[in-house]
Image (cartoon, rainbow, N blue to C red):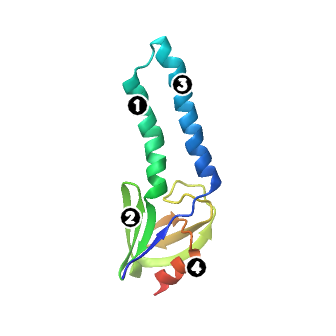
Amino acid sequence: MTTRFYSKVDWWYYLVIAFIALTVGYAFYVEIPRGDATMLEFAFAFTLGIGLPVALLFFTYYEVGENELTVRAAVMTWKVPLKDIRSVTPTNSVLSSPALSMDRLEIKYGNKSVIVSPKDKDGFTKALGQ
């Protein structure tokens, strides 16, 4: 049986999305009337600038299966064999990771690691231990 855990989302993540939307919107509000940008360029920048962060909101989760942990962040996926997990420790690392919160867990496996931020940390760690 597979159990899915969604990422915890901190308030600052929503602030980042709002800042990007306002910045891109303002830039093109100023640039399009001057003729320095087209609506196509605006649509591309807005979709890329807002699309990825919003996709991460809906598609960042962690699935614990019988033999592996699957970490999903929009279009990126990590597969971690449960037997290879050496440790799961709390961290507040600011490194880029599939975690939308600073309340994070670092999972070390093999000679690699991945940082996650499940809403239900206790349930997540228990599921990994089974």
Q: In which quarter of the image is the N terminus?
A: bottom left
Element at badge 2?
A: strand
Q: Are marks 4 and 2 in contact (CB under 8 Å)?
A: no
**Distance in Å between CA atoms under marks 2 and 3:** 36 Å
- Kind of residue at disc 1: Ala
Disc 1 from disc 3: Cα separation: 12 Å
> Mark 1 or mark 3, which has the lower sequence index?
3
Kind of residue sitting beneath label 3: Ala
Whichever of callouts 3 and 4 sits on the residue coming sooner in the sequence is 3
Quadrant of residue 89 in the image? bottom right
Check disc 3 and report its element: helix, strand or loop. helix
Q: Is residue 40 above or below residue 7?
A: above
Asked if labels 4 and 3 touch by Cβ distance under 8 angstroms, the answer is: no
Local packing at callout 4 (Cα closer than 10 Å; few below 14, some 14-19, many 20+) is few
Residue behind mark 2: 78
Query: Could you say which disc has been placed on residue 27 in the image?
Result: 3
Structural distance between the alpha carbons of marks 2 and 1:
30 Å
| Residue 103 position within the rendered picture, expressed as x and y whole percent measured from the top left | 62, 64
Residue 118, picture quadrant = bottom right
Residue type, mark 2 in image = Trp
Residue 65 x/y as whole percent: 37, 79
Q: Is residue 67 above or below residue 49?
A: below
